[in-house]
Image: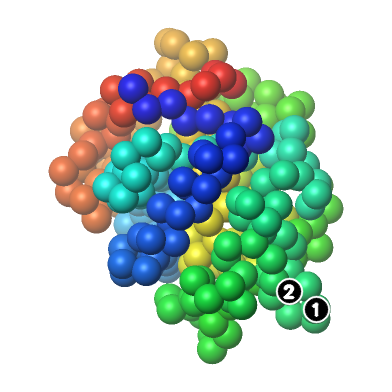
Amino acid sequence: MAVRKNQANLTAQEKRDFVNAILTLKQQGGYDPFVTTHNQFIMSDTDTTERTGHRSPSFLPWHRKFLIEFEKALQAITPTVTLPYWDWTTDRTPDASLWGPDLLGGDGTGTDGQVATGPFAYGAGNWTLTVRPDSRPYLVRTLAADTPDLPTKADVDTALAVTPYDAAPWNSSSAGFRNNLEGWTGVNIHNRVHVWVGGAMGTGMSPNDPVFWLHHCMIDRLWAGWQSRHPDQGYLPATATQNLVSLNDTMKPWNTTAPAALLDHTPFYTYDVAY
Ligand SMILES: [Cu+2]
């Protein structure tokens, strides 16, 4: 069974394998379609029309499936690779090992925030942005510039105490766990981390920054943590609802998998430490 580990506990070899699988996928042309898909959903998901990837109940199962597909693509290159997660409740500063030259590289520099260190620096020659919002071909980060603090453990615990899973109107104004975790309401967990990293992570093309996967892996782990705290609470809505993915509706773009088939992550992978 594949085990997803805290990035802080990866061995040097695991870091190399993860980075090299990403760079190989990029070189083979298999990476950028993930950026395109994510951006298409960001652009089309709205509070009052069809919404699937974001600002809706299927935010969590959609990203779970998206990460599973990305992890499979990496494993087709290196079978032992799994997605690590970034626990930003503990690794909270720009000098965390996550941002080291052997993993993701560091903060952006200069007036533009261009990432200049690590394997995803433009100058290293292996990371040219092709699905991009403007003409700049390089990765940008502005760590902590747009919001000073990452979510704390207390913030996470506040969000994980919320029930039910989601609530009408099933969008960015909803009460419920999903929207508290996504961050449109309450203490703001997921959205805030995108803003804290800045640059590409602050856009619909956020998967251009490989930290996207480690952040969403942490969000996915928190969903599992919520499930274990509230075993009597299920995915909602359970019955067909206009513009939404209900429990048994298949999700675009795959059209093969419903949230019901993704609620239990353990057939696919486990986490080294449950939240
Ligand atoms: Cu996200």
**Front one among 10 and 208:** 10
Name the residue beneath numbered marker 1.
110
Query: Measuring 34% from the left and 45% from the top, which residue is drawn there?
Result: 78
Quarter of the rendering occupied by the C terminus: top right
**Front one among 166 and 200:** 200
* Location of residue 217 in the rendering, given as x and y in whole percent from the top left corner: 50, 39
* Location of residue 162 in the rendering, given as x and y in whole percent from the top left corner: 59, 24
Name the residue beneath numbered marker 2.
113
Q: Is residue 110 above or below residue 207?
A: below
Query: Measuring 80% from the left and 49% from the top, which residue is drawn there?
Result: 95
Residue that extends furthest to the bottom in the rendered view of this protein: 135
Residue that extends furthest to the right in the rendered view of this protein: 148
Task: Give amino acid for label 1.
Answer: Gly
Quarter of the rendering occupied by the N terminus: top left
Q: Secondary structure at mark 1?
A: loop
Report the disc number at residue 244: none
* Location of residue 104 in the rendering, given as x and y in whole percent from the top left corner: 62, 55
Task: Give amino acid for label 2.
Answer: Gly
Q: Is residue 43 above or below residue 216?
A: below
Taking 214 as reference, is 254 left or right?
Answer: left
Q: Is residue 267 above or below residue 147?
A: above
Q: Are marks 2 and 1 in contact (CB under 8 Å)?
A: yes
Q: Is residue 108 visible?
A: yes
Q: Secondary structure at mark 2?
A: loop
Q: Is residue 191 visible?
A: no
Query: Measuring 45% from the left and 54% from the top, which residue is drawn there?
Result: 20
Query: Measuring 51% from the left and 39% from the top, which residue is drawn there?
Result: 14
Label 2 – label 1 distance at C-alpha: 5 Å
Q: Is residue 164 above or below residue 77?
A: above
Quadrant position of residue 195: bottom right
Disc 1 crowd, CA 10 A, few/some/many (<14, 14-19, 20+): few
